[in-house]
Amino acid sequence: MAHAYTPGLKVTDREVLRRQRRLPILGDVLVKLGDEVKPDTVVARTELPGDPQTLNVANSLSLIPAEVPEAMLKKEGDWVSEGEVIARSASFFGLLRRQVKAPCDGTIERISDISGQVTLREPPIPLEMTAYISGKVVEILPREGVVIETTGAYIQGIFGVGGETFGPIRVRAKGPEKPLTAADIDGECRGAIVVGGSLLTGEAIAKAAASGVKALVAGGIIDTDLVEYLGYDIGVAITGHEDVPTTLIVTEGFGPMRMADKTFEILKSLDGYEASVTGATQIRAGVMRPEIIVSGYRSTRPADKEEAVQGLVPGTPIRLIREPYFGQLGTVTELPLELTVIETEARVRILKARLASGETVTVPRANVEIIEG
């Protein structure tokens, strides 16, 4: 019998991980092969070109474009300061003088005798790439970046917003079914990764953002609370670049959703450990999941016996990733072999699953992911 394997969320207290840290444009790599790095270690640096400013010098000086080069006090490649006069003209026997000043610091990039315009390039913007995780540099990407390897605990979420950050884990929920409330955010949460149970409440998110909390993690979130936090409806897109003070990660789905017991127990065992997290999510092509990485964590749990990956089989724990059951957990009960026509009139392979609520549902296999351990 053929099996379909649907990649799922990884939740484990022992995993070997590699993370590539690559600059968007060529720059300088600042570490060597074999170096040990911390999350805030700068591993590569570059400069992004500044924005161009276009100045219509011909119009400002009442000149024809061909006369602009002669009116320039600066030439291409020269550095100028904000407010500095860069061009000047005189008319009526020198009685009427006009001049053009630089609107910002920058470099004269181009003087056009065709358009009469001058392009001023603003100063370059320095960009530093940090390691993000603690580990060892195992590969150098010349002038681009590095690959870092670490071993530790690794937990993927189903959805998140906000960028990379790091801090100690603080578990504030007493159980996986308990929501994270504003009362749970105390002074020890500042600069930390705070873990709740079933829900990130809107009040908790607001207080965390105002209290300097680095990230919040829980089973679910109410969509209206997410919209209120972001200030807009996120839609279908890649997340992780939102300008928010606190990164949010949900492990199960939208709405109040009890965090999976295994996920909660692992996070509870990590209380106090330094973690690296990111909310970056992409559901479609090139799947990315929000993640929590605790580098160097040594589990005291007995190692599980190695098992071959068989994919979907009866008894496999799964999470549904499409409406109307998005985020719900279940167990595969049946895997019919024949193709089935669904509402869209497509013929697909399906499965039957028993949800945590006890309901049995039939869904396309592409609409689920295996919960890995």
Image (tube, rainbow, N blue to C red):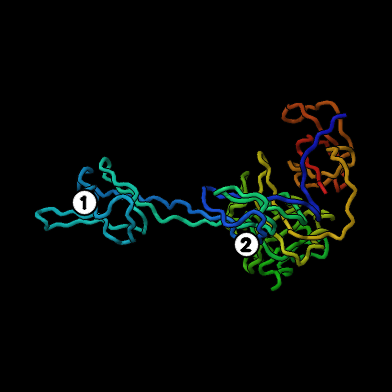
311 versus 86 height, above or below = above
Query: Whole-Å distance between the Cαs marked 2 and 1?
Result: 49 Å
Of helix, strand and loop, which one carries label 1? Answer: helix
Please tell me how crowded label 1 is: few (under 14), some (14-19), or many (20+) other residues with Cα within 10 Å: some
369 versus 2 height, above or below = below
> Which residue carries the number 1 mark?
71
Of helix, strand and loop, which one carries label 2? Answer: loop
Q: Residue at x 88, y 29 (%)?
A: 1
Type of amino acid at the residue the image marks with label 2: Asp
Q: In this view, does 161 lie to the left or right of 366?
A: left
- In this view, the residue in front, 36 or 329, is 36
Q: Residue at x 29, y 61 (%)?
A: 84
Q: Which residue is drawn at 86% across and 30% down?
A: 336
Q: Where is residue 364 shown, x and y percent of the image? A: 78, 34
Contact? badges 2 and 1 (CB < 8 Å): no
Q: Where is residue 280 shown, x and y percent of the image? A: 65, 51
Q: In this view, does 362 lie to the left or right of 135?
A: right
Mark seen at residue 191: none
- In this view, the residue in front, 118 or 358, is 118
Type of amino acid at the residue the image marks with label 1: Ala
Q: Report which quarter residue 249 is drawn in.
A: bottom right
Please tell me how crowded label 2 is: few (under 14), some (14-19), or many (20+) other residues with Cα within 10 Å: some
Q: Mark 2 or mark 1: which is in front?
A: 2
Mark seen at residue 40: 2
Q: Where is residue 64 shown, x and y percent of the image? A: 20, 44
Q: Where is residue 367 shown, x and y percent of the image? A: 76, 38
The furthest residue to the front: 33
Q: Residue at x 77, y 44 (%)?
A: 8
Q: Report which quarter residue 269 is drawn in.
A: bottom right
Q: Considering only order in the chain, which callout, 1 or 2, is on the residue closer to the N terminus?
A: 2
